[in-house]
Amino acid sequence: MPTSIKIKDTSITPNISVDCVIFGFDFSELKVLLIEREEGDFENAPEVPGMLALPGDHITTIEDLDEGAARVLKELTGLEKIFLEQFKAFGNPNRMNSESDKKWMKFIRAEPNVRVITVAYYSLVKLGQYEPQAASFARHASWIPVSEIPVLAFDHNQIVNDALKSLRLKLRHEPVGFELLPKKFTLSQLQRLYEIIIGTEFEKRNFRRKILKNNLLIALDEKQTGVPHKAARLYQFDRDRYEKAKEESYGFEI
Amino acid sequence: MPTSIKIKDTSITPNISVDCVIFGFDFSELKVLLIEREEGDFENAPEVPGMLALPGDHITTIEDLDEGAARVLKELTGLEKIFLEQFKAFGNPNRMNSESDKKWMKFIRAEPNVRVITVAYYSLVKLGQYEPQAASFARHASWIPVSEIPVLAFDHNQIVNDALKSLRLKLRHEPVGFELLPKKFTLSQLQRLYEIIIGTEFEKRNFRRKILKNNLLIALDEKQTGVPHKAARLYQFDRDRYEKAKEESYGFEI
DNA sequence: TCAAAAGTGTTCGGTTTACACCCATGA
DNA sequence: TCATGGGTGTAAACCGAACACTTTTGA
């Protein structure tokens, strides 16, 4: 079977991409996984500034948008079956027209002026599980606290901002915070997560009552270890119960 | 200036489209504006079944997604500055692969197999204002109650369903219902709107209290006319006040 | 024994719910 | 005068907010 131009043409959709805003939480900050624009492309172009960007890729002609986003996530982090949600498509005709973006496009693309729209996803990963594999990144990648995000490539700052908005909204209406915590966690950790992402403080007793009233947590017979104070009880998210409850009615608010 | 092929090539983005789910409310039902696939294309193809579809179009290379959606809306209804919100992108690789879709594509497109993803919007229009212009439709278009939507072209049934979900969510958290009502309306009309769209019943007194407590309605010194019972007071949505309140905090719930 | 976070109950005020009757209008 | 929806008050249950102290642990 000869590799015809046809195959190459139909394997990539040149003006549609997906980008992933991958959130991680380390108990003190919310972070986003950012990659450097491929270094290889800079070898002959030292004048192109190194710049951080969201992990993303063009979709192939045979995959759905969700599949493309899952593939990007897998290729970059090795993770599968991770919370992943489409939140918005971005198509400003000038979204790749800054000077540095144009320079960079010249090195990576045959047709640097093609119009690209991107469908953006956000993803939630448990940092604890994941950090040991950091060396497996295909490219230089790093977790950057959302409060310290520099100027990114293309319109990626806007995409991150919109992702944050969507995440905050989601967090108030659906129990997705657990995706960012280890399987077993304390109520204080959960509370900190909400406080940091939403940016507001909750009163401890009321927060606990409210969370527990939802009946979506399993109290374990286990406690924290290695803390210099009273060890807190560990809890686990009851996903089965949530799936069942969801069928009947909307069952979660914070 | 010669009309070169270049101009034609760059004027349309062949694998990106926008589709609009245009909702209207006539005080008894929620309706969606659907068009027939252009009749002209059927002249030489009587075997292609007439089918309803969402109004949509490919975007040009110089317009943003939102602009493309606004253009489609304008071209179809003549309306501008109408509530319009992007809610999801659809990119299933088989979304145009049903037999009838493929037949139809052959008549309208040079390259019928190109992969197209679509960015979907929903729009809210005041039927009262609009109906007089019905004759100005560029193509056969009709308001179909959401409960009576037939099988549509492509994946448009799914798009309509997702639009409905988004609308219902939006309606509970932001005062967008007013976009579907005439400038002046009664509280009962507003209540019916919520009941019909969300699909639940509200208790009259409590509904009124709740709505009025938001302080976003202006009670007019005007009443309904021509009704065979006590005339109801008319209200008007206070958009300025809402915009101001929005800056401070989220200010609406139903 | 100290520091640091865990864990818990109660009061108060506001909100939600459920409920029934009189009113104005045009037919 | 009747049918139709407009319009209102109140009591009870419930929920959210605010608040302080005792407990456990490791250092």
Image (spheres, coloured by chain):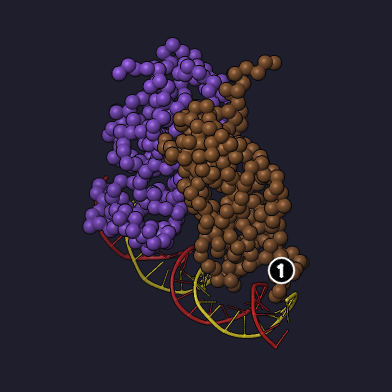
Chain colours: A brown, B purple, C red, D yellow
From the viewer's side, name the closer residue of B205 and B214: B214
| Residue ID at (50%, 51%) | A150
Q: Where, by quadrant of the figure, is residue A18 drawn?
A: top right
In the picture as drawn, the residue positioned furthest to the left comes out as B221
A77 in relation to B242, above or below: above
D10 in relation to B228, above or below: below
Q: Report x, y in % for residue A36.
A: 58, 44
Q: Secondary structure at mark 1?
A: strand
**Which residue position holds label 1?**
A233
Q: Report x, y in % for residue B44.
A: 44, 11
Amino acid tagged 1? Arg
Q: Quadrant of the N terminus of chain B?
A: top left
| Residue ID at (34%, 30%) | B75
From the viewer's side, name the closer residue of B199 and A99: A99
- Is residue B229 in sight in this rendering? no
- Is residue B85 in sight in this rendering? yes
| Left or right, A145 with reference to B207 | right
The 10 Å Cα crowd at callout 1, few under 14, some 14 to 19, many 20 or more, is: some
| Residue ID at (43%, 39%) | A99
